[in-house]
Image (cartoon, rainbow, N blue to C red):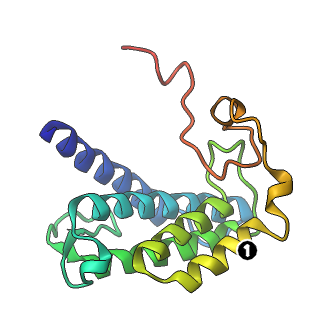
Amino acid sequence: TLRNNNYYWFVAYKIIYGANSNIGAIPTGASTASDHMKGENLFMRAIAHFHLVTLYAKPYSCGRDNMGVVLRTSTDCSVTERATVGEVYDQVVADLTEAAALMKNGSRRGDAGYIGYEAAMALLSRVYLYMGENEKVLEITNQLLGSNPAANLDTDLRNIFVNARSSKETLWCVAHTAVETQER
């Protein structure tokens, strides 16, 4: 429905604004932990822009010069012109590349409800897939899967969602707990 579409637009830009605020406040190189947190925020900005451009613009394969979405890389909201699809994808790739680099030497702050290096690389792989950069998709996927990925899979499908936050198969999930899902 229209209401859901409008709400998604609003919430995505709210996430982007919060991420930009954090990105601007966290100096790069201060510590491994702060670099990881900055990487998490770059990931959030990238995933929000990515989902916005895939929902509200023509696919990348239809042309880089098509109208995309408003690109926000700071807390300055004075410019509201839509960027091209190509410009949005370029920013998403840049954000995910930087996020992965910042998180590579750190560790996730908790279970799979927190963002880590592997989540950034997996999302980057998906972005490259949408861009038609198949060699990059294979390179990243092979790197993430390692030499024997099937040996580590949980074959009991009943465990997939129940244990998503603690599963070694989960790269990242949105963690909902009883507190977040309570009716208000």
Query: What residue appears at the point 14 percent right and 71 percent down from the top-left corner?
Result: 81
- The answer to whether residue 29 shows anywhere in this view is no
Q: Is residue 154 above or below residue 138?
A: above
Q: Position of residue 57 (x, y in %)?
A: 21, 66
- 77 relative to 165 in the view: left or right: left
Residue type at mark 1 is Gln
- 147 relative to 39 in the view: left or right: right
- 90 relative to 57 in the view: left or right: right
Q: Position of residue 16 (x, y in %)?
A: 36, 56
Q: Position of residue 121 (x, y in %)?
A: 61, 68
Q: Is residue 81 above or below residue 38?
A: below
Residue picked out by circle 1: 143
Query: What residue appears at the point 71 percent right and 48 percent down from the top-left corner?
Result: 109
Task: Find residue 105 and report its image quarter.
Answer: bottom right
Q: Work out whether residue 179 or residue 18 is closer to the camera in this orientation and state it.
A: 179
Q: Is residue 182 above or below residue 65?
A: above
Query: What residue appears at the point 25 percent right and 83 percent down from the top-left corner?
Result: 63
Q: Position of residue 53 (x, y in %)?
A: 29, 65
